[in-house]
Image (cartoon, grey):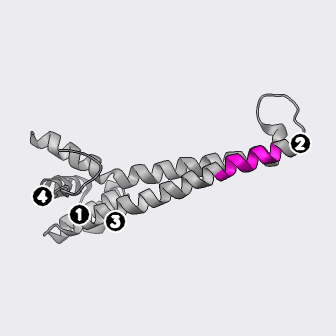
Amino acid sequence: METWELNEKKKEYLNGYKYAKRREKRIREQIQQLRLDAMFPCLQGDGMPRGSSQSDLSNYMEKYEDLMGELKKERLEAVKEYTEIHRAIKEMKDEEEKEILERKYLMRQTWEEIAEELGCDRRTAIRKHGNALKNFEIPESCHCMSL
């Protein structure tokens, strides 16, 4: 496998936590929308008047419970992803490379924030990230992808 392809696989693995947090955020947004729809049924956007009934409340509770179950599952997945990625990063030898990968993939900082913390410019931070990727190894026990 070429270096570029290997680095892309590493980035995909390292981005696992970010993707889990995004899925969690989408579910939270769905829950918020469900709450708004239940609280203000006349604002659902289709122009039709709405009334309230007991069946509406039971439908709401059923959807709410389903979404809360999904949210719990996604939160557990995010913790699992974070733990696995953090453990893999900690296996690296170079402290600065560890810091760059932690800041980029676990703390989800921008290049500007990373550069400021490292005391260098953005371009240097990106170059150092490239070196860190070269030295990073996806654990053999990784359940998420095959190399």
**CB atoms at circles 2 and 3 under 8 Å apart?**
no
**Percent x, y for residue 53?**
89, 43
Find residue 108 and report its image quarter: bottom left
Image-based side of 39 in relation to 95, left or right: right
Q: Which residue is mark 1?
A: 88
Q: Which residue is mark 3?
A: 83
Which amino acid lies under the numbered mark 3 shown in the image of this protein?
Thr
**CB atoms at circles 1 and 4 under 8 Å apart?**
no
Does the magenta run of residues contain 143?
no
- Mark 2 vs mark 4, foreground winner is 2
Which amino acid lies under the numbered mark 1 shown in the image of this protein?
Ala
Instruction: Evaluate whether residue 35 shows in this view.
Output: no
Q: Quadrant of the image for the C terminus?
A: top left
Image-based side of 22 in relation to 70, left or right: left
Which amino acid lies under the numbered mark 4 shown in the image of this protein?
Asn
Q: Earlier in the sequence, mark 1 or mark 4?
A: 1
Find residue 33 and report its image quarter: top right
**CB atoms at circles 1 and 3 under 8 Å apart?**
no
Q: Main secondary structure of the magenta part?
A: helix
Q: Quadrant of the image for the N terminus?
A: top left
